[in-house]
Every structure is written in C-alpha cells, then in structure tokens.
Amino acid sequence: MAMVQPRSIGARRLGAHLALIGFVSLIVFPLLLVISISFREGNFASGSLIPERFSLEHWSLALGIPWERPDGSIVQPPFPVLLWLWNSIKVAVVSSVLILMLATTSAYAFARMRFKGKEPLLKGMLIFQMFPAVLSLVALYALFDRLGEFVGWLGINTHGALIVASLGAVALHIWTIKGYFESIDGSLEEAAMVDGASTWQAFRYILLPLSIPILMVVFILAFVMSIMEYPMASVLLVDEHKLTLAVGAQQYLADHNQRWGNFAAAAVLSGLPITVAFLICQRWIIGGLTAGGVKG
Amino acid sequence: MYTTNASRGLPRHRSRHLSERYTRWALRCVIGVLVIALLWLVMAFHLNGQWMFALLFLVLGGSLAVVFTKRTLMSHRYIFPAVAGLGVFVIFPLLYTIGISFSNYSSSNLLSEERVRGQLLSQTYQAEGKAFDLTLYQEGELVRLYLQSDGENDHENKVQRFVSSPLNLANQETRQIGIQSVDAPPAQEPLGMRAIIQARDSLQGLRLLTPEGTELRMAGLRQFAPMVNRYETRDDGSLYDRREDRVLIPDQTTGFFVADSGEQITPGWPVNVGFTNYTKIFTDPDIRGPFMQIFVWTFVFAALTVVFTLAVGFVLASLLQWDQLKGKAIYRTLLILPYAVPAFISILIFKGMFNQHFGEVNMILDTLFGIRPEWFTDPWLARSMLLIVNTWLGYPYMLLLCMGLIQAIPQDLYEASAVDGGGPLTNLFKITLPLIIKPLTPLLIAAFAFNFNNFVLIALLTGGNPDILGASTPAGTTDLLVSYTYRIAFQDAGQNFGLAAAIATLIFLLVAGMSLLNLRLSKVKV
C-alpha cells in the first residue's frame, strides 16, 4: 500500500473507471453485436443491440435444421457448420495428443539428460519455430500430393495430412514443458533409479504424474492453435464436407453473397465453446503463451 | 542433470519382469515395421523419379534405425520423434522451397519430362481420309459394330463395309479389335441412337484394325475414322510432329519442346533456371514495382501493429496495476476477450461490420457524420481498417506481457519517487519504461515477426484487395509478403510456384535474421 497519496485520488479513480468502461464497451461491442444479429430476422437486418424482430431462423439453420418461414417457404441450411466444427475438433484432439506425446518425451530428454547436439538442437528449434508454415505451403502441398499416391490417408484432402503437418509446431511446446521439468527437483527420479527403475520408468512413474498441470496447459494450447489453423487447412482440404471451421466459416461472407445473419449464428455457436474454454483456462494458457511466443 | 546408464557405457538394466521384456520386444517390432514401411516409400519415390522425397525418407528411415539400435544413442530416442516431425514438416519444406525457387515450377511446367512426353505421345488427330458411319447390331447379349464408308467422299472408290465380331460393350478398357470386310450390312434391324450413347465410353476405348492395317477410332458420335498419333519419338529424343511436319526439340533451359519457329509446346516440365526468379523480382518492372510496394507496406504494417498494440496494452496494464482501482478482475477478463475469441471468427465479424452497404460501422458513421467510407475499395482506408482490426486482435497479448512485467517492479521504487515529488509521468519514463523495455524487446521482435507474416488477417479480411494496377502477378495494396506469395502460388491461372518460392526464400532470410537477433537479445539459457 502506497504511503504517499496524491490529494485528488477520488477524481482520478472515477476518471480511470470511466475510461476503462468506455474502452471495454468499445472492445466488446462487436461481440455483442454478433450475438444480437444472430437473433435478428433476415440476413441484412439492422437495428439496436436488442433485436426488435426476434427470430430463431439463423440458429436453427446453424444447427442444421431446415427453417420454415411464416410464408410457408422452407430454408435449407447453407453450410454444414456442425460437421465443420466436428472436423475441427477431431483434427485438433488427435494432433494435440500427438504433439503432447512428442513434446513431453523430448522435453524430458532436454531437461534431464546430457547428450551430443543438445544445445544446437534447442536453439535451432527456437529459430525454426518462427518460420510460418504459409511460406513452405508449396512444398508441403507437393509433399502430401506425392505421399497420397502411395499412402491414401496422407494425401491431399485428408484430415490425416492436416494432423501430421501440425507436428511441425512441436518446438514451442517442447520449450514450455522443458521449463516446467527443470523447475522440478531431479532427486526424486535419481532415488527411483538408484532403487532399480529404468530411465523410462523414472520418467513415466515419477516425473509425469508431477507434471499433469503443464501437460494440461500444453494440450489446451495445442488444441486452440489447431482449431485456429488456417493456411495449411485452406490448401490441404478441398471438399466441403472435409473443411475445418476456420476454412469453412469464411464462405458465409463470400464477396457476392454475404449471409451476415447466418454467419452470426454459426460464429456464436462455434466460437462460444472455444472462448469459454479459453477464459476458464486463461491462467495457465497465458503463462504458457507469454513464456514462449505469440498466439498463432 | 544425469546421463542414462547406457550412454555412460554401464551394463543395461535387465528387467526381471516378463511383461517388461515383452513390451521391449513389441517396441522393437514396431520400429522394425516403421523402418520397412519407410524403406518401401523410399523405393516407391525412387522408382517414380522423385529423388528429393526418396532422400527425405531414406534419411528418416536410416536415422530411425540407427537411433533405436545403437545403445549409446539412448537419450536421442526420446527426442527423435519430435526432431523427425520438425525435420519433415518444417526443415524439409523449407529446403524444398529454396530448391523450387531456382526452378520454373509453375502450372505450365508442372509434370516431369517423362509424363509430358507421355501426354504428347498420346495426342491424336484425324488423318486425311475417310470417315465411317457406325451402326450397332444386337447379337444375343453382345453387340456387333458395322461400319460403312461415308457416302459423300465416295464418288470414285467403291463403298467400304466392315463388321466386327460380337463384342461385350460393358467392358470399357482400351482394346484393339480386328474387323472384316463384308459386302452388305447385316440383315437385321440396327440398334437406335440411344444404344450408341449408352455405349459411348466403351466405344471410345475401341481401336478397330481394318484388314489393310489402318487403325480406326471413334471420331464423332456416329463416326469412326482413322486416327493417327500426332507425335513420334525419334532416336535423339526429339519428337516428330506428323500433323505440322516439323521436329520438336526438348529444350532443357526452358523446359518445353520447341519447334524451329521458336514456338513452345505446352505442357512443359520444371527445369533449373538458376537465379532467374530472383533477378525477375529485382529487375522486371511489372514485378519489382508491386514487390517493393508490398515490401514497404509489410514493414509498416508490422511496425505500426507492434506500436499500437503495445501503446494500448501498456496504458491499460498501468491502469490495471493501480491498487486504488476496484473490480480489476472483471476488467481484465473483459479486456482479454478479443484474445479468447478465435481469430478467424473475429476477423470475419469485422469483415461484416466494415461492409460498405450494410455494415454497422458505416451505419454509425452515417448517422453521426453522414459519411460512408469505402473500406474495401480505397487502399488507404483498407490499410487503416487492417490496423484497427489488428490492434483489436493484438493488444491483449501486450496487455498480459506488460502486466506481468510491471508486477515484477518493486513497489518501493515508486514510493521513493513519490517522496521526492515525482509525478506519474516521471514514474513512467524514469522507472517503469526503463525497467520493462529490456525483457520486452525480444518479445516485441517476436510479435513483429509474427505480424510480418500475419497471413490469416489479410486472407480473411481483405484478401489483399484492392489490386495494384499494372502488376503482372496478383498483387494487392493491402497484401503482405506472405499473402502475396500465397496468391502467386495458389490463386489465379498462372500459378507460378518458382517465383513464389523465391519470394518465400527472401522472407525466410528476413525471419531468420529476426530470430537470430531475438536469440541474442533474450540470452536464452539452454
């Protein structure tokens, strides 16, 4: 608590609150607007934040249920949003699990073992992690195009290709987990090894159970990053029923045919779970993000 | 810090439990199967003539085998999968991109030379000569073809008539079939047009051989005609063009078959063109102009984004650190909301909000000031829109960074300043900024590099539009270098992978420079 207080403290406090409230409302406005638009009738409706003509049309379409207008015409859902969401979640879960497994084992070696080439490998990872995948898209496309000729599930337009390609992003997570492992005292494992445990057993039965929190964080981080991955998915996936949400959602706002209302419902439906998950886990996620790099 | 027994050269830990030995053997089997699968891929790529991919998988399989059999490499087993992933999906594509940048790989030079040759050799044309009208006759389950030479060309020669043996037209394979001369058409009712249309696919696969040795192919719906292969390989590797009566010589500097007249026959194949793509970027005025413009804008965009997000984030962080303020937790959660919403959704929300005709931004501006700016068609407005949206997206990250760093500053420094009569501005410039700038710099460089390559924002919000006039490649006034490369490679007709790869290589160099600088500044301890 500060000992020396300026005199005009009350006025300043009020000013700070007003400024913050003003700024927050500016920031939150687009988000509230989208929620409001998703309940408005028609695709181009304007109006106040609280919809005057309330309609569940967009929500019904986003959930894949055909909607019957009052005049009797039936509107079919324009895009399979739920399928896209499912694709996104499927790809994200599988790739996060794989990333977690790879990152954990390597982080263990980097944190606890001494071996040739450790320092250049770690530094190299830090450098290569900054190269965006967009730049080598041509090469990645060629790689999966050729691979697909021999291994069907790794070709273009498969989720397998997308999952496998995401393994390149493992470097950031290795650094995060390595930092956590180094903060745990190694004497427990050494004791286990003196008692006859193998290196693998010491890792599996001593260190891993102690590291559940950081593993959760890395899983969530990898999950969020995979859900938001756009460039690779836009090149590797072709068919409408294969798309992930990140690639599919933009079709609502195609230049010639903007479905603003339908988009709003789909955006809230798919964005809300991710947003809520992020906010619940924010304490851990933010620690990991600010330690390692930038949101992707 | 310790080393494993194995890499110290100590005897291996022998497991007493049977189950452990089984797992060990199971692991060995999995590794063996993986190595064999990789070697199979190597062979497949090698036989296909794709040596770069063959080499990649050879290195992968070889290192897998070595790491998991040599006991001194025990520690490397733990890092192998991750390093392999990094190698195959980050480093290999990077090297491959650099390789492509020295070639003319593009939509017109896509296939390998052999496949181009094959494609040309399969081209046919209708030779001078007769065409034959086709009629089908049912013969039990099978169908007989009857051909009669065209009446119009028939003033001098006598009418030629051929008939085939009964065929199964469900078979759609390409096959050669002999036909016999006959004097009159079969004495039964012919099948109608519908039957021919139904059997079209299999009729197209038929090569009918007349007794004189001419090959007839389907030339129209009811016609068969002698079709000849247009090209013929000659011993020196060149192609002879029967139709135009000329010789095509494979030109390994341009990757096309070239006629004497200089005409290039598409498709071509990729060849090494040296530094052509790089010199094009810097000398061809139609590419250099847009490239330099985009290059400058990329730097300005990344720098301004960092400045704006840092300014907003820092001010908010200072406010939120003020211990007289109540309700900090709520403010904080609301303020990091833009960070929690998936970027691809919020960018699209802004795309709708900034819409010229029904977007909310223009509605508000219209009611307040009576203006409706054209956010997507005016270059400067489009750029400001990008900066506004990116500041909205990016400030929470800076806010979180600054909050963490400001919290670490000892409170008594501010106390001392207050005792000496220092105001908020003195505190800011003499205490807070000097103390946070050093740990912040590497993170700012990382943020700069990230926004330098902020592909998603551009792709989803403006797509690079409005276009730069007079550019020979797809280039827009709001394009960043990354989205520019993406558009050259994947958009529009002339997918020029070589040029895109050359620009990508230049960006690689820039990013590598930034990350080396970053590594030095942050003094990473390994």
Image: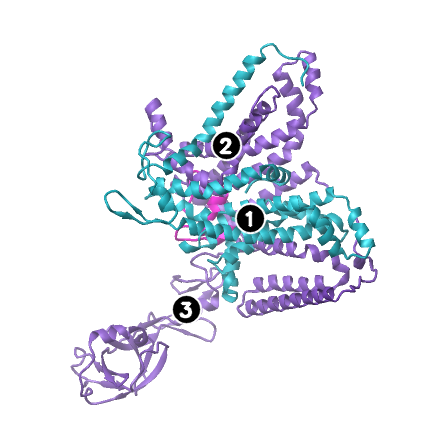
Chain colours: A cyan, B purple
Alpha carbon of mark 3 to alpha carbon of mark 1: how far? 32 Å
The residue range painted magenta reads B472-501
Quadrant where the C terminus of chain B sits is top right
Residue tagged 3? B119
User: Does dot 2 land on a helix, a strand or a loop?
Assistant: helix
Q: Quadrant of residue B69?
A: bottom right
User: Is B180 in front, or is B229?
Assistant: B180
> From what the image shows, is residue B315 above or below residue B37?
above
Residue tagged 2? B391
- Tell me residue B448's x, y (percent): 57, 36
Q: Residue at x 57, y 26 (%)?
A: B328
Residue tagged 1? B505
Of tags 1 and 2, the one toward the viewer is 2
Q: Disc 1: which chain?
A: B
Q: Residues within 10 Å of mark 2 (few under 14, many from 20)?
A: many
Does B294 lie within the magenta span? Answer: no
Seen in the image, is B222 located left or right of residue B476?
left
Whichever of callouts 3 and 2 sits on the residue coming sooner in the sequence is: 3
Q: Disc 2: which chain?
A: B
User: Does dot 1 land on a helix, a strand or a loop?
Assistant: helix
